[in-house]
Image: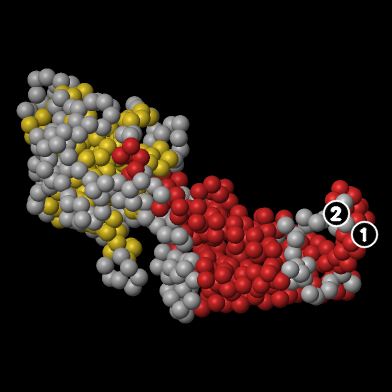
Amino acid sequence: MDSQRNILLIALLFVSFLLFQQWNMDNSPQPQGQGVEQQVNNSGDVPSHSGDGQPIPEQSSSNDLITINTDVLALTVDTLGGDVIEAKLLAYADELDSDQPFVLLQNELGHSYIAQSGLIGANGIDTTAGRAQLTVEAKEFNLADGQDELRVPMTFVKNGITYTKTFVLTRNNYAVDVEYTINNQSDAAASVQMYAQLKQNLMDDGGSLTMPTYRGGAYSTDDTNYKKYSFDDMQDKNLNMTTANGWAAMLQHYFVSAWIPRSEEASNLFTRTSNGQGYIGVRLPTTTIAAGSEQTVKSTLWVGPKLQKEMEATAANLNLTVDYGWLWFIASPLHKLLSFIQGIVGNWGIAIMTLTFIVRGAMYPLTKAQYTSMAKMRMLQPKLAAMRERLGDDRQRMSQEMMELYKKEKVNPLGGCLPIVLQMPIFIALYWSLMESVELRHSPFFGWIHDLSAQDPYYILPILMGASMFMIQKMSPSTVTDPMQQKIMTFMPVMFTFFFLFFPSGLVLYWLVSNVVTLIQQTLIYRSLEKKGLHSKS
């Protein structure tokens, strides 16, 4: 197999892979009544069940809001129920070079995405008839310089029971603890159940041909470390699972929100849909508070970027929301190596280039074997042609004599395929690794490349990549004699360049540097083969 056919194989496999991804998204049944025109439902009077037990109230809202600010988060909380209706990520810009922070949670007319939590049960304070109006001491709370923890209590008193909902935030942390302390000074035992859910407009999965990203739900249980549960899944069937350890989340490109129950007993994971909204959440086990006593129940809300190390420290398997697909076992170590290199060189573009040299260097023995096999195969072409002319249509004998010739000349006809077979999974894995890495979002390289996660604005890298591919093609020995195949091979760099116009510039940089390394390796290998009399240019 010669290098031109190898390039064709790469192109067909990669393009087929991307087309398959996009076909899955385009052919999924679309939810009804969705989109930005869907209005937010704030009626607060629609019964809605999740799993077994008491109905969970719909979202209600008021104009009595408070703000909670840390060094990385700016939250807006509605005192009616104490829901987080807005979350700004202060360390991440909304757009490149924007001074506005990225908004993950919001409660706008066109798009509602909020984190709701409350207490239901016999003595719960959140019902389908209405949410509890919580009392708070101030309108704004700020994590002061030198302060590592900020606690924001909100209270409600009913029938001799004091309910205190406390938001606990820490410095440089996107994990927010939400505690309910129930102080029962009544004459009878009280029974409550904490729930925590994420609500968002029913939307399509999002993404494009070159960026097939996912937007929707996901969960983790004792038996399933990580599984997506799309808005289509929510409409088809309500999730209803019991697990001792797990979480429920809403995902989008680079960012995630998740509720993690903090209970020693099993919790219930659920989904539901109502009025164009999709819900995914957790219900903690029922807690009984004896008269004259106090108990606390808690869940953790992660609301932030997909930072693997930090998410793993927050909850088991939460880091798996950085979804590398079926090649995770390659993509994950590649990302760790890339992050390690970046920590040394301080630039993600240089880190990608360094990673490319490492990968291609490790594959050099296979690359050398590939080109040696290609050169030997080319030198055998006259003998193979004479053999075909002599044997005619006797395929069985032709096959036998070819194998004897390969054995005699110590040629492996598949020797040129192995590096391509290995390089393709590495390329796809690196594609997912770069696409899922929030660290590359808005990360500059040099010159005109201000965002390695976005396409090259001037298409310089894709053009250079196409030119390098054309040079590789010209340098490679070819056994192709059919004029049509020759035209296809000549057109391949042009087709590849077109596809790479829309890829993230970080990925194009990898492929360009890989091609440059290939050209260097080809030159060295061919010089060595020429000395041995094995190389003959096409």
Q: Give the residue at x 50% y 56%.
A: 19
Read off the residue under disc 2: 393
**Amino acid on which the number 1 mark rests in the picture:** Arg
Looking at the image, is 158 positioned above or below residue 423?
above
Between 78 and 49, the one lying in front of the other is 49
Between 439 and 526, the one lying in front of the other is 526
Could you give the CA–CA distance between mark 1 and mark 2, rounded to whole angstroms? Answer: 9 Å
State the colouring used for the structure image: secondary structure
Residue 33 image offset from top left, x and y in percent: 23, 48
SS type, badge 2: loop
Residue 245 relative to residue 356: left or right: left
SS type, badge 1: helix
**Amino acid on which the number 2 mark rests in the picture:** Asp
Residue 204 image offset from top left, x and y in percent: 33, 51
- Can residue 113 be seen here? The reply is no
Residue 98 image offset from top left, x and y in percent: 30, 71
Q: Local crowd at mark 1 within 10 Å, few (<14), some, or many (≥20)?
A: few
Residue 452 image offset from top left, x and y in percent: 46, 68
Q: Give the residue at x 7% y 28%.
A: 160
Q: Give the residue at x 52% y 69%.
A: 500
- Can residue 500 be seen here? The reply is yes
Between 254 and 297, the one lying in front of the other is 254
Tag shown at residue 390: 1
Instruction: In the displayed orientation, state which residue is furthest to the front.
Output: 393
Instruction: In the displayed orientation, state which residue is furthest to the left.
Output: 159
Quarter occupied by the C terminus: bottom right
Residue 89, quarter of picture: bottom left
Quarter occupied by the N terminus: bottom right
Instruction: In the displayed orientation, state which residue is furthest to the top.
Output: 188
Is there CB contact under 8 Å for labels 1 and 2? no
Q: Give the residue at x 36% y 30%.
A: 241
